[in-house]
Image (cartoon, rainbow, N blue to C red):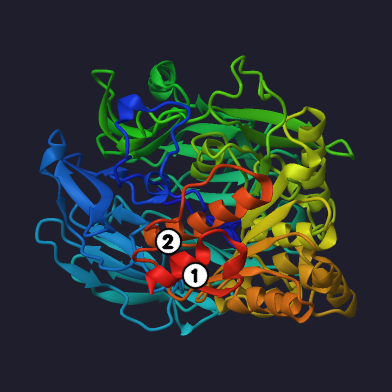
Amino acid sequence: MHFNRLAALAGALAIGLTAVAAVPAITKERSAMTKETLIPRQVIFGNPERTAALISPDGTQISFLAPKDGVLNVWVAPVGDLGAAKPVTDEKQRPIREYYWSENSKYILYLQDKGGTEDFLLYATDPKTGTTRNLTPFEKTRAIIFGSSVKHPDEILVGLNNRDAKWHDVWRYNVVTGKSSLVYKNEGFAGFVTDDNLKIHYALKDQPDGGFLVETMDAHGKLSPYMTIGGDDSLTTNILGFDVSGKTLYALDSRGRDKSALVTLDQKTAKATVIGESDKADVGAAIANPTTGKVEGYGVNYLKTEWTAIDPAIKADIDFINSQAKGEWDIASRNKADTLWVILHDPVTEPAHYWLYDRKARTLTKLFTIRPKLEGAPLSPMYPVVITSRDGMELVSYLTLPKGTDANTDGKPDAGPLPMVLFVHGGPWARDGYGYNSVHQWLANRGYAVLSVNYRGSTGLGKGFTNAGDKQWGRKMHDDLLDAVDWAVKDKITTRDKVAIMGGSYGGYATLAGVTMTPKEFACGVDIVGPSNLQTLLSTIPPYWAAFFENFARRVGDPRTEEGKKLLAERSPLTYASQIERPLLIGQGANDPRVKRAESDQIVAAMKAKNIPVTYVLYPDEGHGFAEPANRTSFWAVSEAFLSQCIGGRFEPIGNDFKGSSIQVLDGADHVPGLKQAMAEKH
């Protein structure tokens, strides 16, 4: 079953800053590591040794991502002989970050862009020959996969916006021959729900309140109303998809309730029948059988993820894996026979690894560790905490303390307050969770307490909590972050003068809001691809976000009205740039299609006009975040030196961490220890 996602907006401004990492060798033997060891950035943020394991549908092959000539590519090995793995793709510049097996087990399918533009094209690689074909050889086009099928294993449904940049037409592709045919010319729909016959059943259209009208589509393309998902439910109600028979339609549904439940929908009346729910958090994941598409279980993440079986057939499997897992776990893939599962296991204080689970033998065999060079490293535990906001909301948060500073494991430093980094997630329609977090571990290793907060507007914790963030950018959403800092100061985790704020995308916005709107609250800020001007942000969104524009207008502010323009100006950090009085570091990708370079350029220009110092780092070959390991590591090197002089943590000299990076320092190299010299040596 291919799960269709209604709330694609949820990831619209999100950024992945905790990419898997660990290839270059640690300078000391792993067995000799102590809490005093400074873990090299290359180990934390460089390429993983291997990651993203999947099993082929026929159960004969294991695939994973691993470096080939320094670039993440797909490797394939026979099940049971990982040592025989060979690279099958040959990307030379950008890492592959998203790939799949075709249902016929004959091809690796992956999406790839150039330079961070997010114009993703779809490629098919034959693992036997290494031959790769571009199935969508178009310019300025973003391909998306709408559906796949166990009934038609040679075919997939692909969305292409090459005709009209705003809308994705639906095409049926044969991955064996590469031939395609138009299924539906899209002139206004945000998404589609398809079945295993690769037919469209429902089409979703944006509504003025930020919600969606769902219409039934018959075999001739005729539309009729099915149900309306109102604006209050638009981020917490998703139609997931059909089982293989086409008789059962699954959804996550918050209509008439606060927490999203897992439901089946009557295909005529849209009446929901609950099959999984929680009073603590939304149902956030469903476990579907790989052959029948029947949903057999679900996951709920409040403080940590808890898995519940619906079908008794997998209850013993979940119980067994729970008994063996030390931390979080998830099912990465299952073969069609459902005899083998690939499990991602994250113990938090050890590097994550993959298991191959044999259901019949009830055994877990380790496939590989993602970051083996981190074995024995002084990784820190993560503490889930619930902080109460000034107006009584529960803010699910995660705290990491430096290894060795919390001997009694009560979540408070033994020897008194530490400098702290408030690390803010992007989205904002996303959430922080429990588990290994490379940024948390890196900063904790440098001597900082690290706190991440699910501020209002975050998802996964009920629609009331998500909707409480509507039009609260820079206001109540920011108050939640300030309340979390107050909590940390009161609990003697940190002191008020030693708190830095840092984040990407919305987290970058929060950083800019912090140093402009509340200029005395933070000692300094690190902004990564954060918007500074909400009016220009909404006027330059990618054309294919047109389907979600009403949601932006509802939740951020409406640039089409005078009232909306006033609100957007009021909530824009650029408006208050002259108030900045604490050090600021900005990182930006030149090709970012979501938060364009102008967002950083504007605030840097405003600061320079007032003679306010700023350090501005640009990557000409990156987009919304830094995908290439050399770029990622170089920016964290600059950030580490910047934070060290701001709130006093340890730092590893920049050294050769600029090697292979496209880093440009447009302003303020003098403000960061070692930066000017490192740039001179790079050139």
Which disc number belongs to residue 373? none
Q: Amino acid at mark 2?
A: Ala
Q: Residue at x 43, y 82 (%)?
A: 140
Picture layout, residue 387 above or below residue 563: above
Q: Is residue 364 shown left or right of residue 463?
A: left
Residue at numbered disc 2: 627
Q: Amino acid at mark 1?
A: Gly
Q: Residue at x 35, y 44 (%)?
A: 22
Q: Are marks 1 and 2 in contact (CB under 8 Å)?
A: yes
Q: Is residue 67 visible?
A: yes
Mark 2 surroundings within 10 Å by alpha-carbon count, few (fewer than 14), some (14 through 19), many (20 or more): many
Q: Is residue 95 shown left or right of residue 557?
A: left
- SS under mark 2: loop
Q: Is residue 120 visible?
A: no
Give residue 638's position: percent from left, percent from top. 53, 58
Spatial distance from mark 1 to mark 2, Cα to Cα? 8 Å
Give residue 349's position: percent from left, percent from top. 46, 28
Q: Residue at x 40, y 46 (%)?
A: 20
Picture layout, residue 623 above or below residue 187: above
Residue at numbered disc 1: 623
Instruction: Please tell me which residue lies in front, 466 or 671.
Output: 671
Q: How many marks?
A: 2
